[in-house]
Image (spheres, grey):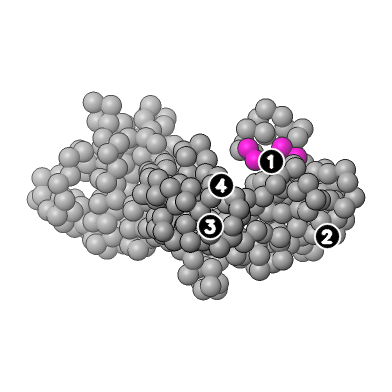
Amino acid sequence: MDIHEYQAKERFRAAGIPVPPGEIATTADEAEAIASKYGGMVVVKAQVHSGGRGKAGGVKLAKTAAEAREHAFNILGMEINGLTVQKVLVTPAEDIATEAYVGVLVDRKNQAATFMVSAAGGVDIEEVSHSNPDAIRKLTVDPRYGLLPHQAFWLANFLYDDPGLIKQASKVIAQLYDSFVESGASMAEINPLITTPSGEVKAIDAKMSIDDSELFRRPEVASMRDSSSEPPSETKARDAGLSYVKLDGNVGCCVNGAGLAMATMDLVKYYGGAPANFLDIGGSSNPDKVVAALEIITSDPNVKSILFNIFGGITRCDDVANGIVEATRRIDIKPPIVIRLTGTNEDLALEILKEAGFSAYTSMDAVVEKAVQLAKA
């Protein structure tokens, strides 16, 4: 689960990280009132779950409250990477001497949190890692002990030469790790972490992603979810109990079990196609879940064929077959559907599909190859 910048700043502020004040506005008038309260120059920042806000025109400096109102009016309602801006953060502008990057994320290879820091802040860290990997210092944190003081100092020492700045940055890095752990995050970053001409270290931006598996024991974090800022397909999948990730291909995949889903997507690539999604209906399905899955898949205009690959263990093939038939009654499904159902109640499922005018495959290779051919056609 992604949270907004202003919400991440609340988490950072609670951990003691020096974060400038800021307030949320949902109208241009509210933005003007907030800017008037702060006085001086402010920044008006779009709040959406997307990077590239500045490049899209979603981050603007305003010298006056009237200018803040104008920027808010232009930003509210704009689309950034397909997401509509419904609120802006108004925060005082800072005098910036230097910019750095500090981030921590779950490193699945090392099965531990890993820090990345760079003195080249204010830009995409991916660009830095490709163009100048030596500009990044990494540290894997032993989960048994957490981030130790000398490790935080070692990271901060890579960013600054001044002892005073190193001391402040060491504290911020330690606090960022605390916030990361306490929030159940999979990623937390400050970009940029700035220094001011007067020698202060501040976090003027914040980004945090929360591990969904941690939400059940952190209701205060779960309450930060903003479904209006998520793709509707992901919200619908979550509500239906489906595991869904949108991809860039044109073969819509509906599979049961994560392992089979991954194998199916690999096979789609093997036969020259590209999967449009990862969609796992789970080990125990019912017709309504299948209907929801097809509604999600067909909402993607890039999908040119739909592939069902079901291996029925706990999942009953007849439930899936009934779901497919019911979905075709409810939804105008234009892409062709190819189906493989094998396992529990397979014979009954094939009979249900036959009566509805569908045919099914028993070979995984054959059904995937057919789905790819139809998508290309």
Using the image as rendered, state which of residue 49 and residue 282 is in the foreground: 49
- On whether residue 163 falls in the magenta region, the answer is no
Identify residue type, mark 4: Lys
Residue designated by label 3: 35
Identify residue type, mark 3: Ala
Label disc, if present, on residue 121 of the rendered structure = 1
Marks 1/2: CA–CA distance: 24 Å
Instruction: Specify which label sits upstream in the sequence, 3 or 1.
Output: 3
Left or right of residue 166: residue 290: left
Residue designated by label 2: 148
* Residue 132 picture location, percent across and down: 71, 29
Residue designated by label 4: 63
Instruction: Tell me which corner region of the image, top left, top right, bottom left or bottom right, holds residue 365.
Output: top left
Relative to 277, does residue 318 appear above or below in the rendering?
A: below
What secondary structure characterizes most of the magenta part? Answer: loop
In the structure shown, which secondary structural element does the residue marked by tag 1 occupy?
loop
In the structure shown, which secondary structural element does the residue marked by tag 3 occupy?
helix
Relative to 217, does residue 180 appear above or below in the rendering?
A: above
In the structure shown, which secondary structural element does the residue marked by tag 2 occupy?
loop
Left or right of residue 323: residue 187: right
* Residue 259 picture location, percent across and down: 46, 49
Please report the bounds of the magenta region as a residue range.
119-123
Marks 3/1: CA–CA distance: 26 Å
Relative to 21, does residue 58 appear above or below in the rendering?
A: above
Query: Which callout, 3 or 1, points to the residue nearer the camera?
Result: 3
Instruction: Specify which label sits upstream in the sequence, 4 or 1.
Output: 4
Label 3, residues with CA under 10 Å away: few <14, some 14-19, many ≥20? many
Regarding residue 181, the answer to whether it shows in the image is no
Instruction: Specify which label sits upstream in the sequence, 1 or 2.
Output: 1
